[in-house]
Image (spheres, rainbow, N blue to C red):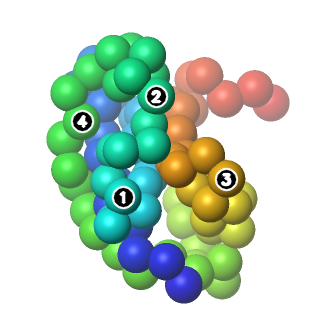
Amino acid sequence: MRSVTIYRSSKRDGMYLYVDRDELLSRVPEELLKRFGRPVEVMEMELSSARKLARAEAASVLHQIEISGFYLQMPPSFVCK
């Protein structure tokens, strides 16, 4: 279980950043933040690998936050099928 904060992009609809609530945006690369635009906080939650998310696997989100400090959720039109 991890406490996460979720931000939406001010530049692109459907793009979200998931980060550890304690670290916030400190581990997100500056270049990504420039492309992401102004982060707008939308939610805080307790996330476990068993939790259902609409467009991501919770276990993948948690793993990516652990190793990179963030998880970037792309808009549906950018997701490869």
**Other residues around mark 4 within 10 Å, as few (<14) / some (14–19) / many (≥20):** some
From this view, report whether residue 34 is shown above or below residue 81.
above
Helix, strand or loop at disc 4? loop
Name the side, left or right, on which 66 lies relative to 2. Answer: right
Q: Is residue 29 left or right of residue 65?
A: left
Question: Mark 2: which amino acid?
Answer: Pro
Instruction: Please give the label number shown on residue 23.
Output: 1
Q: Secondary structure at mark 3?
A: helix
For this view, does 50 lie left or right of residue 27? right
**Pointer 4 residue:** 39
Q: Nearer the viewer, residue 74 or 66?
A: 66
The residue nearer to you, when weighing 68 against 47, is: 68
- The residue that disc 3 covers is 67
Identity of the residue drawn at 66% across and 83% down: 50
Looking at marks 4 and 1 on the same chain, the residue that comes earlier in the sequence is marked by 1
Task: Kindly identify which residue carries mark 2.
Answer: 29
Mark 3 near mark 4, Cβ–Cβ under 8 Å? no
Q: Amino acid at mark 3?
A: Ile
